[in-house]
Amino acid sequence: MKVVVGLGNPGLQYAGTRHNVGFDVVDHLAERLKAERPQSKYQSEIREAYIGGGKVVLVKPMTYMNKSGDSTLQIVRFFQLEASDVLVICDDMNLPLGKLRWRASGSAGGQKGLADILQKLGTDKVPRLRMGVGRPPGQMDPANWVLSRFRSDERDSVEHMRLIAADSTEICLTEGITSAMNRYNKSDEDA
């Protein structure tokens, strides 16, 4: 069994923001995999589905971004999973808009929701998909940037990124993280 944790903030005021791309991919996967109706458990909205003969739990923590580790830890404990059974999907300001990067482990790179998950699980060996949302323009506060909505001229790139993120997550779930990294981590020259 695998758990896919899409990071974001609950509430309509955060819908469509850069910080919520993880929620968006989980919603897309739930629709694509014909997941069960959402349930409120473990301080999260969860949906169960099946892919490649295995069960997957799709998770949207309702704890707000910076406390995402609280709900993730509850789920890992309840289902008696290893940290490597969790896939985290989150935004990344250090990647250009539309760029995806899979990693099997490593630091949080400044992403506070991911940092909280790594801290609560006690390891950096948590597979994750980082989705590029670009750097804030000028002197804009990074917190305001990730809570901003995508501009109209960015929407096509964002929609394409979400679809590719869902495709790559399916590959990770069925073929493993190495396959996802090999197929979707393109160099800057390939982008």
Image (tube, rainbow, N blue to C red):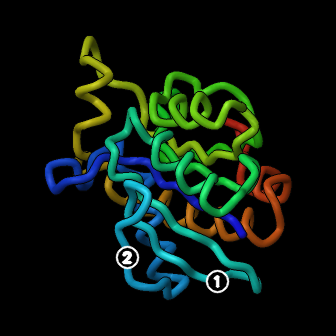
Q: Which mark is residue 181?
A: none
> Which residue is pictured at 35% across the width and 42% down the height?
19
Specify whether 17 is left or right of 115: left
17 sits left or right of 24 in the view: left
> Which quadrant would the N terminus be assigned to in this image?
bottom right
Q: Are marks 2 and 1 in contact (CB under 8 Å)?
A: no
**Which of the two labelled residues, at mark 2 and mark 1, occupies the earlier sequence position?**
2
| Residue that badge 1 annotates | 50
Task: Give whichever of 53, 146 is nearer the camera.
Answer: 53
Residue at 16% across, 56% down: 12
> Which quarter shows the C terminus?
top right
| Mark 1 crowdedness (10 Å alpha carbons): few <14, some 14-19, many ≥20 | some
Going 40% across and 64% down the picture, which residue do you hit? 41
- Residue 191 in sight: no
Q: Secondary structure at mark 2?
A: loop
Residue receiving disc 2: 38
